[in-house]
Amino acid sequence: MHRRFLVPGVLAASLLLAIPASAAEGTVGAPGIGDPYYPASGNGGYDVSHYDLRLKYQPATDLLEGTATILATTTQALSRFNLDFGLDVSEVRVNGKKAAFARNGEQELEITPSATLPKGKALSVVVRYADKPSEVKINGWTSWVRTPDGAVAAQEPESAAWWYPSNDHPLDKATYDVSVSVPDGTQAISNGTLQSQSSKLGWTRFNWRSAKPQATYLTTLAIGKFDITTDTTADGLPVVNAYSRDLGANGGAARASIERTAEVAEWLTEVFGPYPFDALGGYSPNVTSSFALETQTRPFYSPKQFANGANVSVIVHELAHQWYGDSVSVKGWKDIWINEGFARYSQWLWSEKEGEGTAQELADYTYALHPADDPFWTVKPGDPGPDNQFDGAVYDRGALALQALRNELGDATFFELLKGWPAEHAYGNASVGDFVAYAERVSGKPLAGFFDTWLHRPTRPESPAPAGARAVRAPERPASWQKIAETNTIHDHR
């Protein structure tokens, strides 16, 4: 299904005809950034440095009005370029001048500036829009979920296209200012730090800032009526946690878990090195989904994560992503093991710290759960394919690979790797191949065959137990295994 043009067809045609001949001298930016899993994600021809989003939302009608200002640099001479966006647009300006725009399918907003944009020059794009995001479907789904008193945008691998125009792929990170006006008595939660809050004429505006590079899917927005707790860590980081006031029976367990965010982050700095951002927190809105997501500085937690009581393990998982997935992001979505294998393994390390089962015991138990003919072993964590990107094997077999690597290298080298990797690639992107090369360099050992066995072969490897300690029967279930298993591994994505 194609959504309608964003301007009437005759006007679009006349604007295109009015473009000076010089515009034809540039090239058209690619409609995708080149990710084989998601060919339509991202765009070519420019690199974004900053998004300024000025929004107004009415929960009663789901009407979102916005003006997005995008600051970027051209990476080629552009006669036309795309943004990923699904809402209805009323005006686009490029470097201050009105530009022609049209819809090409459900996701692509094609923009034709009044003149060719030279390569390597600063670019500003202003997009004015208004729509009801929950009614907009791209590939049959939406990341925008209405709640009883507001709405939430939190999804993976894409969520931006339903609330702001962007270059929607982790390869193009940027900083953010997100300013949201909502009816008095309602709050707006986003990433980073709250710069200011003000009320006028029945509306309250919240201004949030993310000062470190942030991927588009890690940018979140939650609007509703929340109970908010604030604090400051020993290092001076502001902590903001938010809970929908109508969480019901899961509310207490959600708070008992999320309120330990600062404690967990402090422990993770011992494992992964200094916390990479300038804010901390989490939020749990009244949604019916069951997943959690590592939205940068302020992870999203569905209330169902706490249906069986406090679940600190999921807090560990999403906060571990702040290093592995948020600061160091994937080059392509096939590199998802860099995110999920390490976040799952952090849960095993937390269990080890809490005396509820060592990482080795969890590895032995997980390994024993899956006999050689289990389809679990056919999923290749190092390149699982788009249909298996969030399969449980990416998480659990991915964590098994790390325990096997720990046994191969010894604790000293292994934990040196865990700290060194996010320091070396901070705020950037990296692939599975990059990690293999890094591990070989730091350890001084040839590891390509090891990683091929654990990440790329569709068969069951030898047990990850240390040499001489092979498990001969299924071990007893460690006490923390159930909580780790409750961390949903299947995102509700397309």
Image (spheres, rainbow, N blue to C red):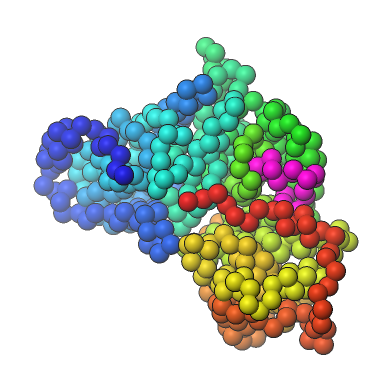
Tell me: residue 349, above or below residue 138: below
Left or right? Give the position of 348 relative to 219: right
Give the residue drawn at x 71%, y 64%: 345
x and y percentages locating residue 212 in the rendered image: 56, 48
Tell me: residue 120, above or below residue 415: above
x and y percentages locating residue 444 in the rendered image: 65, 84
Q: Nearer the viewer, residue 190 or 465?
A: 465
Left or right? Give the position of 480 relative to 124: right
Give the residue drawn at x 59%, y 40%: 191
x and y percentages locating residue 183 in the rendered image: 55, 19
Left or right? Give the position of 72 relative to 152: left
Give the residue drawn at x 22%, y 38%: 100
Residue 95 visible from this viewpoint: no
Q: Work out which residue is located at the far front of the displayed protein and give it.
A: 373
x and y percentages locating residue 313 in the rendered image: 76, 53
Magenta segment: 297-315
Which corner quadrant of the image does residue 432 belong to? bottom right
**Residue 55 sits inside the magenta stretch:** no
Specify the quadrant that holds the N terminus: top left
Q: Nearer the viewer, residue 353 or 20?
A: 353
Q: Nearer the viewer, residue 30 or 428?
A: 30
Which corner quadrant of the image does residue 255 belong to? top right
Give the residue drawn at x 83%, y 73%: 475
Q: Nearer the viewer, residue 305 or 11?
A: 305
